[in-house]
Amino acid sequence: MTPTHPLEASTIRTLYWRILPFLILCYVVAFLDRVNVGFAALHMNADLGFTASVYGLGAGIFSIGYFLFEVPSNLIMNKVGERIWIARIMVSWGLISAGFAFIQGQNSFFVMRFLLGVAEAGFFPGIVLYLSRWFPARVLGSATAIFILGLPIAVLVGAPISTAILANMHDIAGFKNWQWLFLLEGFLAVIVGVVAFFVLGNGPASVKWLSPDQRKWLTSTLDAERRVKESQRTYGVMEALLSGKVALLAFAIFCNITALFGITLWMPQIIKGFGGLTNTQAGLLTAVPYFCAGVAMVFNARHSDRTGELRLHVLVPACIGAAGLVMTGLSSSPQLAMLGICIGAAGILSSNILFWPLPSMFLTGAAAAAGIALVNSVGNLGGFVGPYITGWAKDFFGNYAASMCMLAGMVALYGLIIYTFVTAMNRKVVSIPGETN
């Protein structure tokens, strides 16, 4: 909701401008290093002899490492503080991403993708937790949505940068173009990670850029919200990890991320498959669906925040996104297929951004750190399933029709689950065996 009190409005405005731009930059760099393999694949696959199935498996293995180390990473961050741990994550994943320049075949590709997932584990849920410690609940959804805009921005910025590197840096200093892509974009993450150590604060009480009145209002508001949640239902770490609510949210976001990464890590190749495009043209056109997604994300988040309605703002975009993917898979027209993938990306992402404040509706403290991490780690297994089934279906059927329809079903199921979950939460009754509110 829009803040009404002048002190509240000025504090929220300060938080937006002092916290979100740098976090968006961090997410842009993070997502760029996660998906640049999709651009590199236009050349790397041929150079190293990767089939669609091998590439899809390697692209997805990232999520296995992410899954295994997500919860421990977030619990460590809860102990040592956001500034140190987020900086550590970015530096380590940047070095590993740069190391992709030296892979020799499918085994080293698989190992490096796994290690990249290990290094990045904890970043996204850590930022979600970080935001919950700065922004009151009534604006947390909008703040999270603005942060997640880093995802389409990463592709909008990354598509022309990545294609320019691939087009202009072949056989320089003995490295191929795709090797330069990994080196340059990996070291960018290292630089931003070092800066993060000096820029991020560990909480409202530790920063000097809030006035005394703003600091007092913000800390008292956040403390009051925490006390309300704790009075309704207090979760320990293990209870949060075993919670049926957390499990349901984890499965829901797994469905969404399966669809998201099923198209994201294949998009340059899907678009090239429309016919008549060079690698550079296909790479540049990859930015178009994410421009559409960025516009849809802003509109959907602002409208949801203004109206206070969440369920339909998840369900409707999810179903529209599913329809777009079906259009992409079944259309024989390149123009309609391109329109479909634009609609699909917009629907998937604009429904995704409203998900992340949900765990904070009933989790606090270390339980929130563990619960959000578990939700995200299970969800990111979709980052394995989506790319792999897309590659497998491409090899088996010879096209992307079957995989697009499967991904469409996943994102539609996500929308239905969240609609049902939020309805139950609003009624203060969640029908999960063994749990009460």
Image (spheres, rainbow, N blue to C red):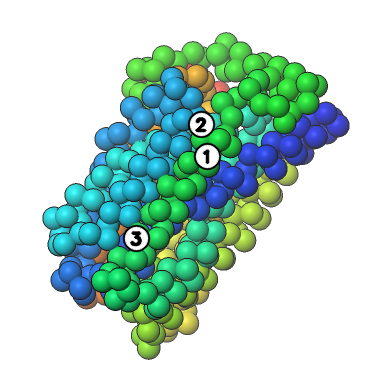
- Against 19, is 216 above or below? above
Q: CA distance from mark 1 to mark 2?
A: 7 Å
Q: Residue at x 69, y 36 (%)?
A: 15
In the foreground, 372 or 40? 40
Q: Which disc is residue 275 wearing? A: none
From the viewer's perspective, is 128 left or right of 227? left
In this figure, which residue is indicated by the disc labeled 2? 83
Which residue reaches farthest top? 231
Q: Quadrant of the N terminus?
A: top right
Residue 306 appears at what percent x and percent y?
73, 44
Q: Quadrant of residue 249?
A: top left
Q: Residue at x 80, y 35 (%)?
A: 9
In this figure, which residue is indicated by the disc labeled 1? 196
Q: Are marks 1 and 2 in contact (CB under 8 Å)?
A: yes
Q: Are marks 3 and 1 in contact (CB under 8 Å)?
A: no
- Against 403, is 277 above or below? below
What amino acid type should be assigned to the residue bearing mark 3?
Phe
How would you rate the neighbour count of disc 2 (Cα within 10 Å): few for under 14, some for 14-19, many for 20 or more? some
**Residue 396 can be seen in this image:** no
In this figure, which residue is indicated by the disc labeled 3? 182
Q: CA distance from mark 2 to mark 3?
A: 26 Å
